[in-house]
Amino acid sequence: MIKTELCRLLDIDYPVIQGGMAWIATGELATAVSQAGGLGIIGAGNAPADLVREEIQKVKKVTAKPFGVNVMLLSPYVDEVIEVVIEEKVPVVTTGAGNPGKYIEDLKEAGIMIIPVVPSVALAKRMARLGVDAIIAEGSEAGGHIGELTTMPLIPQIVRSVDLPVIAAGGVADGYGLAAVLSLGAVGVQVGTRFICAKECTAHENYKKAILKARDRDAIVTARSTGHPVRNLKNKLTRQIQAIEQKGALKEEIETLGIGRLRRAVVDGDVIEGTVMAGQVAAMVTKVEPAEDIILDIVEGAEKVMKKNCELIV
């Protein structure tokens, strides 16, 4: 099996991290991924600290393997969530939507590894100066909030810019994707969309069906005019957002329209007027299966691709 620096750094069997998707990345999914040899991640999102603690304890009751929490730095509860992460001795913290600088010293003193998600070289360099342990470089193919650069050019630029392990994210769902990002200099991959269709994922069945039905051009970007673009599957809500954007709606009006829509899709199953966040690989997801099978398919698939290519070169 493929072993990289990431496996040694995180004490995991395979160089696969599960994305910290809000409402989707619960303790159940994180447990399954960690048990299968990857790194499971709990998505804290905007959840209060006590709910994040409950999800952490779900994982700790089942497995002693490493796992992490994704901390959304714009959350109104971020300070309390950081305290819980430290109290619960979570091994790894990934961060998004902000600068984790004010928390790094406390996290490091607690022995917690810090791995921020970044969309650009400039932010990767800034994080490296702050002393983080690794970088997740996320291309705009990913689902949810995205940057501008795609994965193919982003990864090698960040690899050359920082002396840290770089984990690729955005646009990877199978062995071909893992082999590609390893060739670009990454030490592993963060996978989100495919894990939505893990059997252990608690997302509503309608959400999973929406992923399975997606075609290659269905994962579109909305809300660009707000400065915080989001990739999600086309539906009635995305059409509404596009319509008011074209009419020059203010940022506040667009953001207000999106409030609570992710929960509406993930928990309530409203995939018509809810936000169905998904990456461009959604069309590559064809079935609901155990998290372990997803990880093995990605890693074994990458091995086959790399072996075949090496044989062709020889």
Image (cartoon, rainbow, N blue to C red):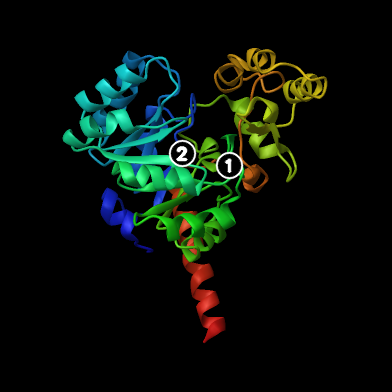
Question: Mark 2 is on which residue type?
Answer: Gly
Residue at which label 2 appears: 19
- What is the total number of numbered labels drawn onto the structure image? 2
Residue 263: x percent and y percent? 55, 18
Q: Is residue 44 above or below residue 186?
A: above
The quadrant where residue 207 appears: top right
Kindly identify the residue that appears in the image at 64 percent across and 12 percent down.
256
* Mark 1 burial class by Cα count in 10 Å: few <14, some 14-19, many 20+: many
Q: Earlier in the sequence, mark 2 or mark 1?
A: 2
Compare residues 53 and 102 and report the one nearer the observer. Answer: 102
Q: In this image, 260 relative to 124: left or right?
A: right
The reply to whether callout 2 and callout 1 are in contact (CB within 8 Å) is yes
Judging by the rendered image, the residue that carries numbered circle 1 is 142
x, y percentage for residue 155?
A: 50, 55
> Where is residue 62, by image quadrant?
top left
Q: Left or right? Give the position of 271 relative to 138.
A: right
